[in-house]
Image (cartoon, rainbow, N blue to C red):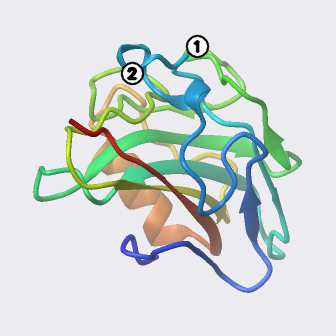
Amino acid sequence: MDHNTSESSASPGLTLQSQATPAGSVVAPQQLVEDLGGENLSPDLSWAGAPEGTRSFAITCYDPDAPTGSGFWHWIAWDIPASATSLPLGVPREDSSLKQARNDFGNVGYDGPQPPPGAPHRYQFSVHALPVESLGVDPEDPHIGARFAIFSQQLASGSFTARYQVTG
């Protein structure tokens, strides 16, 4: 999947959406970190059109505009059952129905946007259809292992992009 898309991208059939943060919108206040006045809640997500052979899903949230040279990962979750078609607003960090890696803030689960002042940042939310029930990745390991397993095995993915900017 190309992490430099501007608005949305999807493999044929697999789509992802959020009522809280629609594609092309500004990230909703409740998804922002508390330092920016938010509630730091993961957005509600729903998906459809998984290909045949899907045995689980993964979710990622990535900021390609972070000034790190390699972007910033806000959320990596996997081993979501194939029967699932959505995640609710505010997935708890300790949710036992899925696995979540430590994000680039160093926390397990989702942490919202907190870009430095300046240009707008893009936040790419993606769902990945996977051919295995479990990635077999330890959530305590660095998230590169989970990301490698997700991106190297995905049958399809669907994404949308939202933006956020801190001015002044």
Foreground residue among 49 and 124: 124
**Label 2 sits on residue:** 36
**Amino acid type at mark 2:** Leu
Answer with left or right where residue 7 lies relative to residue 17: left
Tell me: residue 138, above or below residue 76.
above
* Mark 2: few/some/many CA within 10 Å (<14, 14-19, 20+): some
Relative to 104, residue 50 above or below = below
- Which residue is located at x 35 percent, y 15 percent? 35
Q: Residue 160: x percent and y percent?
A: 60, 63
Figure quadrant of residue 65: bottom left
Residue at position x 46%, y 75% in the image: 6
Tell me residue 156's x, y (percent). Answer: 65, 75
> Could you tell me which residue is drawn at 74 percent across and 48 percent down?
18
Which structural element holds mark 2?
A: helix
Measuring 51% from the left and 31% from the top, which residue is drawn there?
100
Q: Quadrant of residue 78?
A: top right
Rendered view: 113 above or below 125: above
Q: What mark, if any, has residue 94 been given in the picture? A: 1
Percent coordinates x, y for residue 37 in the rendering: 46, 16
Dot 1 or dot 2: first in sequence order is 2
